[in-house]
Image (cartoon, coloured by chain):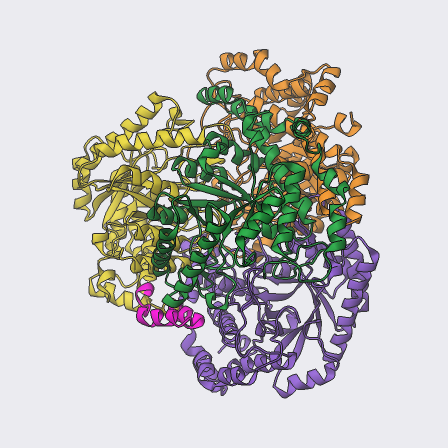
Chain colours: A green, B purple, C orange, D yellow
Amino acid sequence: MEPALASQAIELPSWAFGNSGTRFKVFGTPGTPRTVQEKIADAATVHRFTGLAPTVALHIPWDHVDDYTALRRHAEDHGVALGTINSNTFQDDVYKFGSLTHVDPAVRQQAVDHHLACIDVMDATGSRDLKIWLADGTNYPGQGDLRGRQDRLAESLATIYDRLGPEQRLVLEYKFFEPAFYHTDVPDWGTSLVQVTALGERAMVCLDTGHHAPGTNIEFIVMQLLRVGRLGSFDFNSRFYADDDLIVGAADPFQLFRILVEVIRGGAMDPASGVAFMLDQCHNVELKIPGQIRSVLNVQEMTAKALLVDTDALAEAQAAGDVLGANGILMDAFWTDVRPELARWRESRGLPADPMRAYAESGYQQQIEAERVGGQQAGWGA
Amino acid sequence: MEPALASQAIELPSWAFGNSGTRFKVFGTPGTPRTVQEKIADAATVHRFTGLAPTVALHIPWDHVDDYTALRRHAEDHGVALGTINSNTFQDDVYKFGSLTHVDPAVRQQAVDHHLACIDVMDATGSRDLKIWLADGTNYPGQGDLRGRQDRLAESLATIYDRLGPEQRLVLEYKFFEPAFYHTDVPDWGTSLVQVTALGERAMVCLDTGHHAPGTNIEFIVMQLLRVGRLGSFDFNSRFYADDDLIVGAADPFQLFRILVEVIRGGAMDPASGVAFMLDQCHNVELKIPGQIRSVLNVQEMTAKALLVDTDALAEAQAAGDVLGANGILMDAFWTDVRPELARWRESRGLPADPMRAYAESGYQQQIEAERVGGQQAGWGA
Amino acid sequence: MEPALASQAIELPSWAFGNSGTRFKVFGTPGTPRTVQEKIADAATVHRFTGLAPTVALHIPWDHVDDYTALRRHAEDHGVALGTINSNTFQDDVYKFGSLTHVDPAVRQQAVDHHLACIDVMDATGSRDLKIWLADGTNYPGQGDLRGRQDRLAESLATIYDRLGPEQRLVLEYKFFEPAFYHTDVPDWGTSLVQVTALGERAMVCLDTGHHAPGTNIEFIVMQLLRVGRLGSFDFNSRFYADDDLIVGAADPFQLFRILVEVIRGGAMDPASGVAFMLDQCHNVELKIPGQIRSVLNVQEMTAKALLVDTDALAEAQAAGDVLGANGILMDAFWTDVRPELARWRESRGLPADPMRAYAESGYQQQIEAERVGGQQAGWGA
Amino acid sequence: MEPALASQAIELPSWAFGNSGTRFKVFGTPGTPRTVQEKIADAATVHRFTGLAPTVALHIPWDHVDDYTALRRHAEDHGVALGTINSNTFQDDVYKFGSLTHVDPAVRQQAVDHHLACIDVMDATGSRDLKIWLADGTNYPGQGDLRGRQDRLAESLATIYDRLGPEQRLVLEYKFFEPAFYHTDVPDWGTSLVQVTALGERAMVCLDTGHHAPGTNIEFIVMQLLRVGRLGSFDFNSRFYADDDLIVGAADPFQLFRILVEVIRGGAMDPASGVAFMLDQCHNVELKIPGQIRSVLNVQEMTAKALLVDTDALAEAQAAGDVLGANGILMDAFWTDVRPELARWRESRGLPADPMRAYAESGYQQQIEAERVGGQQAGWGA
């Protein structure tokens, strides 16, 4: 077993355990958590069955509590730690026309203040990363001044960045479109890089695998961001069309494999690289806990395959211009069935050989469905 | 003024006057209707300022009332008529895994029954068209049996079609993706055509301009559907990325112009063609009534330009292989500013020369913002 | 070993053995055939190492010879048969503005005559299928009359179809774009279906896996064409962006797997279905013969995986709404490493266990590089 | 007339006057230049009829001559100047697997040397800009090491950059795909920016309007590159699907308008900005000289419209959150017919009011068709 694989850790998003959906419908499901504490319990369950998910990311204000120190203890009691803090400036009415980019200084200040409050949370939870994804953008040409918005974004981010502690980082996520339809203020990795470079050493780019134009070679971006030392984190998921937020590896497992090949190539499996591996998914129609289990297993399996690539032989074939030989070396790794060995590794660590089956047989799902009656199921609203 | 232009009629969707948004947020706006009667009043306002929108489409159950005859009179009192009836099988929990395609006969029956109830509504409102858009589809490969779902769809549609009166039509809309992310059961015009052809003469295809893959030549599809006599209706809107549902003509006005060139070429400006021109839009961040006014004006302006094309000269240039000449004839029409003549035409009919300004100065918006206090603003939920 | 797998046959395109490239450059390679006889010898080599490729498709006039009966014997002497005849109406200057759709009857006649001559070839070679791919289209809006071109296409195809013998078929390929950039006359499966349905029972659709808009669900189209009984043939290849014509399965092997799942689901593995499985690829930078070997192996491997799907369990999970279970059944088949069993099967038939390695060690490549000196290397020109 | 408009200058590519096509066919046309001198004569003709195109870009080695000083005089005699020098490392067999990124130092050196030779040409022609577009990339995953290629690119570019004179610039073009199909070494503006920033102040990004993923908001990139001071030049053209290289403004004139709005917003109409406006097009099926005339007129017309935007009113509407008002201000400018005023301006400068007609009636086309008989028509080969 590769040591890199043994230390692999994938952060779970608390919101993956709540309800989600499309603009057409959010389907509720029995057993859905009503509180952040229940979300953390579910996340800890994923870790208990896989050994892969030791931390949980929070979303503020969805996961707001009065006592974050107590929440931290709650997580630790369940065997996990709190991770990245995600801000939210897209659900307050005041942000209809932007937040950190808004033309009105009062709105910008409100949005900045929210981020400062998030840093307070980080101080309490011991989180390293503040992740910023903005819904800022416009729907119609002319609606906003692209340039002015970009300048205001830079100013707002600088204010937030200045508040960070010496061990904390700001990670700026980019997204091609949605919810804005004409332009988004951070549409691509280039813009995110320009903005974070202006901030300082502890500002990084977040790459969400579903946030690109059709046909984009994502592993190239992974390579480039690692090359310039600015890949802060991944938001893993998969998509067929837009930002579908499906289970990572479900739509194009070969793409996920190629991404992980570049992760390894760029040294990002080394915890010292500081690259955070997170999921950001929506389980609209499938069960949420096994959806997360499946997701971390997919990342693990593709990583195991990527680690099988015979890099010496590959370099040789590449140098020789042996196109089919080089491609064949990659594909040999991809087609190798790593599941038996991973099952053995899990058993050697006291984990179930087949986490999906073990979860199904554990009775946990039945238990939460029976117990979590009444209250308000968690979703994107609260 | 072209007679074709003078008789142009664009149907408004009742739901365009309610709130809409994205999965991230639905912003409310002052003055939003609380009832279908208020929606119809707003739609009638659009018609009063433009003379272009004599009918309103309803969405069941969003616009459900106990007495449709009374609703019909309400519309007529406001100077408009009720139009297409749109069914909805995407918001009931039972439809999580499909409606007309569902593997469970009981669910299919419920979905069929809903459509039969819609036909009852049509009988009461005097509507000609039953428009069916399905959210049916799957998110993950393997989740459903594509073939079986298609066969069940055919069977369900046949049952619905059989219930139609001799003057009524079934119009089947296709959509590339969303809310399903792996496959939709009616993804393209080919599938819709295959299904409606199997039904009979009064089954037609609905073309929503936002429901195609990137790069699709939509005017070609318009041409083909008119050629085979199966273009039932348009759902007009515009998009930069996915099904953005922006104001028609806002994203790519030249595309709208080209579509209308094919509409004219195929004879669909003739009311006898039976082609219905409807809007299907979401005014997430802009005011809804002027958003609709802007939309029907855009269709009118592009139609006026399309009617300016010198078709004799065009045919001659095409026959001569004069690429630049032929393209130039089209562009001459497109670049001609038709707004002054349209303003004169409006004035000649007792309509305001500038409907956008006239609406803004009319006080209607202030009035509804003042009056419509309390109650539940209409949206996609009810 | 599944019997379906044992009888699998994939047709090779003669042109895959010639040089190809992009508009920027066509790179030559040592050993490239100079004649159709040498192309057939290479195709036979692929069959000799894999047992998967018993027929070769010809492209007229690239593969024109005076004596097709002799060519047929040449093929049989090499252990293969001649297959589909592909027409070419895109390289003569007269076709600059179209062929079967051209506004000039004389040009249309010339194009029709070419197809009649191709049917003569078919009579001599014993080929069943006439495959028609058209470069017809326009680059600028207005350049052509979309509707008139469609009508002329129908007329031209009818003339060709009438000439077919009772055992022969016409297969019409569609393509999203290229070489025409504004519109193509057969852009999608819907148009191809409309056209072939008008012709008669022996007119079918050809699905080239690289000829779709970004994000298109190709397996859905496979399902639908099989459902309506009009899937004539596949042109297999793969692509990341446009019609890249890469080795099938190289860009998205999971997509190829899903396509083959639908092939099996729709009964197309049964030779009686009449569905032809062909490659249509360009080996621009890789060696051509091993490129073809790799391609047929990819199809075989994905077919073997698709045959592993536990369809009973899948149907049960689908009926139960078990999204993750159903998807998991599919993925279990996909992740199973079928290569060892396929190697054993090959050996049991006297074929090399590893055809790629066997070819590399056979000396064939060195032999043709040494022998094929002088003459004009085959390409798309002749 | 806006002064900005009066001083507008658009550089023509010499290669637009030669033959071009697709991988399927290059159609020849009567009158096509055989030499670079004839190309310059044609480019000068475009300038004579429009007053918009005072310079011609050269492509080395396509336009290679022994005496560049004589060529410079030839251009000046025709009333134009020589402009940007474009290198070519994609047509020599040695570059099959890359040029500046090649794994073999000898090939990299050859490619670097070619660029140094181009700088020699620049010294002789007085050109300011060396424009580098690379075909470097791979077709199959694993074929090359993405990271190593990027590092070698940086090293090669640094060597070239060091050789530039103090008034000379290096401009690095990016391209999404083609001719490489899996990855290109400079796929996006982010990569180009990272590379040129590492070089120094006189290294800039070239934005070709056809080199983006589907749906990309190009005006946003224009804004961002101007904001960070790295927009070196435009390669104007238009596209429906891929890098179609159609006449600029032909596919989506509203997009071209929005791009020019950002050009003005960012100060790039000021010659001091150093932004070069060039065409890069292929006239595959239309006449080349009027194709270029149409192109520069399109840029001029969209610029004239963009200059009409009431920026004060726009800023006010934007600040007020008046979405429809702001969009309306933009659209008012777009829909204004600027052609009459531009015709008057042309006449005031002694230019034909209608350059397209004037060219058609000038007899120039007939003259070159009669005179340019024999020799080898220019194309991408030489």
- Pinpoint residue B37: horizontal percent, then vertical percent: 64, 82
Q: Is residue C154 visible?
A: no
Q: Nearer the viewer, residue C150 or D101?
A: D101
State the extent of the magenta-drawn residues as a range. Answer: D305-331
> Does D325 lie within the magenta span?
yes
Q: Residue at x 23, y 43 (%)?
A: D83
Is residue A120 left or right of C303 when viewed as pictured? Answer: left
Quadrant in which the N terminus of chain C is drawn: top right
Is residue A211 left or right of D234 when viewed as pictured? Answer: right
- Pinpoint residue D168: horizontal percent, then vertical percent: 21, 40
Q: Quadrant of residue A77?
A: top right
Q: Nearer the viewer, residue D99 or D35?
A: D99
Q: Residue at x 21, y 63 (%)?
A: D3
- Pinpoint residue C97: horizontal percent, then vertical percent: 49, 48
Q: Is residue D76 visible?
A: yes
- Pinpoint residue A351: horizontal percent, then vertical percent: 68, 33
Is residue A318 left or right of B157 when viewed as pictured? Answer: left
Up/down of B307 relative to A69, above or below: below
Is residue C118 left or right of A144 when viewed as pictured? Answer: right
> Does B253 lie within the magenta span?
no
